[in-house]
Each structure stands twice: as structure tokens, then as C-alpha cells.
Amino acid sequence: MNDATVTDLIGLLQNESGSIDMQFQLWVTVTSAVVIASFAAGNHFSRRMKVFIAIMYALASAAIGLRYANDASQFLFLQNELKLRGVEYPTVIDLRILRTLVYSFGTVATTIFIFTAPGSRINSK
């Protein structure tokens, strides 16, 4: 990182910020799709299919969450690198805790919803 200019570091920081936002948007999209599918077709899914969907959703959420954690650590690294060079990169609020809570509670709630969605109790095999 010693060869990188301040402009390069700011560009990298902005790319990491965009990647973090993209990870969150991807997770919201996947979660919405699972909720809608569970609500609309839950009564047509066998118990095994619900378990399969829950496992796949949990794995996808974990992959997205790990990618988010990696991007967040890179963001902090770049922000600290700028501080070492005397440049403050302003951030309004630290969203790491809030996003982690949304990921965690949202994933658990969605997984529960897969099994308890209205109509999903009709045909639980």
C-alpha cells in the first residue's frame, strides 16, 4: 500500500463501500424471493423441500454475510491507511452493527417463515 496515492486509496475505499451496499442489496433480494416463494407456494412444498430451501437460504446468507464481513474489514483497513497519511475519510455513521443485526435477525426470521408461512401448514409432509 505504500505505492498507492491518496487518490488511489479513496477510489479503493469507495469501491469497497459500493461492494458492501451491493452485498446488502443482494441479501435483501434473496430474502424477499424466499419469503414470497414460501408465502405463495409454501402449501405445495413437502417437508423435505422446505428443509432444502432453508438450508440453501442459510448457506446463501452465510456466503453473503462473509463477503460483507470481508468488504467491511477491507474498508476499515483502507480508512486506517488514509488516517496514517493524514487524510480523514468522513463517515456519517458506522453501519456495521446495524447491518449485522439485520442480516442475523432477518436470516433467522426468514428461515422460520419458510416453515410457518400461511398455507405452509396445510401440506407438511
Image: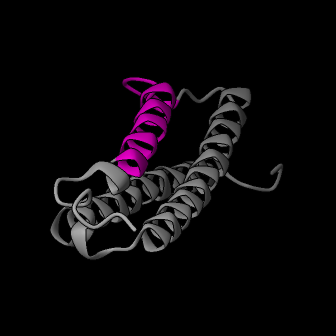
Q: Position of residue 119 (x, y in %)?
A: 17, 60
Name the residue located 59 percent from the left edge and 62 percent from the top edge: 59
Quarter of the picture holding the C terminus: bottom left
- What secondary structure predominates along the stretch shown in magenta? helix
Q: Looking at the image, what colour scheme do you see? A: one colour
Q: Position of residue 103 (x, y in %)?
A: 45, 42
Rendered residue at 50%/34% (across/down): 100
Q: Nearer the viewer, residue 104 or 90?
A: 104
In the image, taking residue 125 as reference, residue 42 lies left or right, namely left
- Residue, x 40% and y 36% (percent of image)? 102
User: What is the number of callouts on the image?
Assistant: 0
Asked if residue 116 lies left or right of residue 46, the reply is left
Q: Nearer the viewer, residue 18 or 22?
A: 22
The boundaries of the magenta stretch are: 89-112
122 falls in the magenta region: no
User: How far across and how far down the image is residue 29, in percent?
Assistant: 31, 63
Q: Residue at x 52, y 56 (%)?
A: 61
Foreground pick, 94 / 15: 94
Residue furthest right as drawn: 2
Coordinates of residue 58 in the picture (x, y in percent): 54, 57
**Closer to the camera, 88 or 36?**
36
Q: Is residue 96 magenta?
A: yes
Task: Decide: is 51 above or below 116.
Answer: below
- Decide: is 47 above or below 14: below
Q: Relative to 64, is 24 on the left or the right?
A: left
